[in-house]
Image (cartoon, helix red, strand yellow):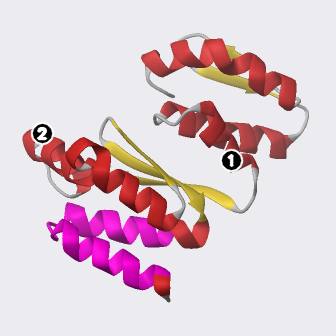
Amino acid sequence: MIPRERIKLLRNKKGELEKILPVKIRTNEEVTLESEDPSTLMSVKKVIEAFGRGFNLDTAMNLLDENYSLDIIKVNEFTHSRKRQISLKGRVIGFRGSSKRFIEKMCNIKITVYGKTICIIGRRDRIKLAREAIEMLLNGKKHNTVYRFLENEVKE
């Protein structure tokens, strides 16, 4: 299940996936996958899940590499207030996207903030570092503290 607005975008992009992989994608109210190979189904499922979470198709396609992974942080686990959730997502994004870009650059990952989630695509070891930095922000740590943490971790 992915949001309707993302299904509409997927309809335009599904041909690209079908050319690369032996899979048939149908998009109605939900997405249906067909393939002879179960491992292909699992790989494409990850790509479509990432696309549904707000990543562009090129970034989501990184999940076809077994060294890459998708991590999902649910903002509503940090607060139940809708206003506070919006505020927390804003902390992760930062002024004009500066925090998000800094974490992406330092960890060599991609982040998307969509709906009630913050999602990360990257190599597993780097995802762990990015998740820790994001959770620090969600728990109220100052941005400079998080930036210093990332700089020190990357140096090591």
Q: Is residue 25 visible?
A: no
Where is residue 39? Give x, y as percent: 82, 46
Where is residue 24? Give x, y as percent: 80, 21
Where is residue 124? Give x, y as percent: 59, 67
Taking depth in this image into account, of 65 and 41 the one nearest to the observer is 65
Residue type for callout 2: Arg
The image quarter containing residue 41 is top right
Disc 2 crowd, CA 10 A, few/some/many (<14, 14-19, 20+): few
- 131 lies left or right of 26: left
Based on the picture, tell me whether residue 136 belongs to the magenta stretch. Answer: yes
Residue at point 76%, 53% (across, down): 65
Between the residue at mark 2 and the residue at mark 1, the CA separation in whole angstroms equals 32 Å
In the image, residue 87 above or below residue 44:
below
Q: Is residue 116 visible?
A: yes
Residue 62: which numbered mark, if any?
1
Q: Earlier in the sequence, mark 2 or mark 1?
A: 1
In the image, residue 36 above or below residue 108:
above
Magenta highlight range? 128-154
In the image, residue 53 above or below residue 124:
above
Which residue has dot 2 on it?
82
Residue type for callout 1: Asn
Based on the picture, tell me whether residue 145 belongs to the magenta stretch. Answer: yes
Taking depth in this image into account, of 100 and 80 the one nearest to the observer is 100
The image quarter containing residue 133 is bottom left
- 73 lies left or right of 8: left
